[in-house]
Amino acid sequence: MIHYRLPISFVRSLQRILLVGVCLLSLGCSNFSWNPFGGDEDPNQPVELVGIQEEVELRREWSVNVGNGQGDNYTEITPVVDGGFVFVASEDGDVVAVNSLSGDIVWREELEESITGGVGAGDGIVMIGTQDAEIVVLDQTDGEVIWRSRVSSEVLSQPQTNGDVVVAQTVDGKLVALDRQDGVQRWTYETTLPTLTLRGTSSPVITPDNTVIAGFSNGILVSVAAEDGVWSWEERVAVPEGQYEVERVIDVDGDLLLDGNRILASSYQGNIMAFDTLTGRIVWGTEASSYHGVDQGFGNIYYSDDKSHLIAIRNNSDDVVWQNENLEYRSITAPKTITNYVAVADFEGYLHLVSQIDGRIVGRSRIDNDGVRANIISDGGKLIVYGNSGTLTALSLQ
């Protein structure tokens, strides 16, 4: 079977074209007019930003440039913080270690590969995935390449390690574990993919119980043993519905959130679900459509839906605490909580701070004119934002 992985913007266009086709076949839409290539009649035009009353100031602490950033492909290479350093990579092979306090570059390694997945860090190593289906592992202290290992296909998310294995998810629906020391393959778990999926994969999570949990493009969450890949449980985050393939896209692309003994996962055109990490038992769930991960704070679960609405749901309930629609269709990132706020960035490179209490935008700063796709991360009370052009910026809240 041939699998097609498409950017979310293209999938939205297919959905609109399908809607137009269905509408034109019905008598009630005989006068319907729409330009599928954009323009004023495009119903998914991003809203213009309106002025806000700033209640918190975002101050730049430092900024460094990293290669070509996300490049021309639809990549989402996210930095990672480990041991007081930020590790970041660009699509054209620039891998950089930055002191998270001062912003000083500790080392820079130029690889020849096109990087599409990363960055993972832990146990003294940095892990990235490439377009040419390789996992590359570098030493955290000096950036020296320790080993490379071939996998079955392109890697689009962050590899992870527990010190024994390095695990990564590939775009052909496989979860692979490589030996931490030499990169030799230890095991592979494989699932069946639907015909049409979004371009992206979630990053696997290694739990304290030494299991690996991963979400796939068929809407399934799977748990296997980190040591040998033995299956533990699998559950559905979403069930495909609809007559057409584009209606049945239910990817689990957002990063999973480990919260004690439960794991939270979101799916496109599906749900947000919480499962017991040991048994897979459903703990909580609510209907939602998101291709990003979730975050939590103030007793709420925060997510950005497929219309770029930022939504707060009371934890373990269906109660919507607030919903902010002021960034509609601005392709906002996954939410990141910090102190009293939720941070998201958008396609024009603006970073927005939203009150966790009532959902008002109370702070804003433009980070990168080329936009921001990568997840926002935090370290020691600072937000770290990686712009599409390769600008890595640390900001404090004043």
Image (tube, rainbow, N blue to C red):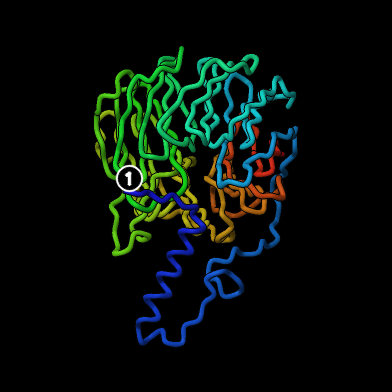
Q: Is residue 142 above or below residue 214?
A: above
**Considering the numbered disc 1 on the image, is that residue within a helix, a strand or a loop?**
loop
Residue 95 x/y as whole percent: 64, 27
Residue 181 as seen in the image, left or right of residue 188: right
Q: Say if 313 sits above or below 139 in the image.
A: below
Compare residues 341 and 254 and report the one nearer the observer.
254
Residue positioned 70% across, 20% down in the render: 107
Q: Which residue is mark 1?
A: 193
Q: Nearer the viewer, residue 340 or 376?
A: 376
Residue 318 visible within the image: no
Name the residue nearer the viewer: 356 or 382.
382
Q: Is residue 371 left or right of residue 294?
A: right
**Residue 207: horizontal and vertical position, in percent?**
37, 25
Give the x, y percent position of residue 168.
43, 29
* Label 1 neighbour load within 10 Å: few <14, some 14-19, many 20+: many
Check the image and report above or below for 72 versus 183.
below
Q: Residue at coordinates 36% horizontally, 39% vertically from top-left?
A: 173
Quadrant holding the C terminus = top right
Can you say whether 241 is above or below 41 in the image? above
Please state which of residues 194 and 58 is positioned toward the viewer in this rendering.
Answer: 194
| Residue 243: quarter of image | bottom left
Residue depicted at x 59% and y 45%: 343
Question: Quarter of the image holding residue 193?
Answer: top left
Picture coordinates of residue 267, whole percent (x, y): 38, 48
